[in-house]
Image (spheres, coloured by chain):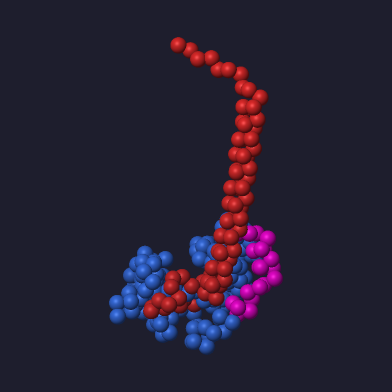
Chain colours: A red, B blue
Amino acid sequence: MSQQMSPPKPGGRAVWWVALVAVVAAGLVIAISLIGSQKETTTRATTSDAKVHANRSLMGDPAARVKLVEYSDFL
Amino acid sequence: MEPQLAELIAKGIVSVEFRHYAFLSGRSQWAAEASECAADQGSFWAYHDLLLKNQKVTFTMDQLKAWGNTLNLDSQAFGQCLDSHKYEEKVKQQAADAKKLGVTGTPTFVLNGKRLQLKQDPKNPDNPFVQVVEMVKQAADQ
């Protein structure tokens, strides 16, 4: 038994276009919000870097009870 | 990094800080400054490892910049940092502080404010880290 598809009606086509526009718009909104959140992450990372800045060559917890300092020359 | 030391660092028991004592030549100074420029981009330790791995290579400005590229650092910012000698004073100040502490050679280790006196280890003549790790472990166990 076969079913024949009827040609799209003009009203149906309009609904299809509205749906397409909605999907594209939603995609744009998601993309913009993702870009926004990436910027926020970058800012957070920068802030976090600023915290570590004073001890950038320090590895580990600055409050660790055992503190090892190495004085060295790279040559 | 010695695995045992890395484990103590990961547990928050030990912190390790690198300070510059660039006294061997002007190129030592450049390398130290370059590591600080890498630190600007969160890559101090990666650059540190790279320098130590390539100690036999002549540290020219171009070479130091090229190593920045291998770490995917922002080459423009890294180059500007190096060319402007942004960290010249910091590196020199650390060396001056080291001298005040009585540091005369490298590497010198200070554990909880006390300079470690390392013995000549016939088993590991070129690797003072074995002794250092032992001392750090002892301090961590106390």
Quarter of the image containing the C terminus of chain B?
bottom left
Q: Is residue A42 magenta?
A: no
Taking A74 as reference, is B108 above or below it?
below
Give the number of marks.
Answer: 0
Q: Nearer the viewer, residue B82 or A74?
A: B82
Residue B58 visible here: no
Residue under the point 64% across and 64% down? B78
- What residue occupies the far front of the structure in this picture? A11
- What residue occupies the far left of the structure in this picture? B141
Q: Nearer the viewer, residue B99 or B124?
A: B99
> Secondary structure of the magenta portion, mostly?
helix
- What residue occupies the far top of the structure in this picture? A1
Q: Nearer the viewer, residue A47 or B85?
A: A47
Residue A13 location, x and y as percent? 64, 27
Magenta stretch in the rendered image = B73-92
Residue B12 location, x and y as percent? 39, 71
User: Does B84 sit left or right of B45 as displayed?
Assistant: right
Taking A37 as reference, is B12 above or below it?
below
Residue B17 visible here: yes
Q: Quadrant of residue B81?
A: bottom right
Residue B119 location, x and y as percent? 36, 79
Residue under the point 58% across and 51% down? A34
Residue A72 location, x and y as percent? 50, 75
User: Does B133 sit left or right of A37 as displayed?
Assistant: left
Q: Quadrant of residue A75?
A: bottom right
Quarter of the image containing the N terminus of chain B?
bottom left
Residue under the point 43% across and 77% down? A63
Residue under the point 60% across and 78% down? B90
User: Does A47 sit left or right of B121 as displayed?
Assistant: right
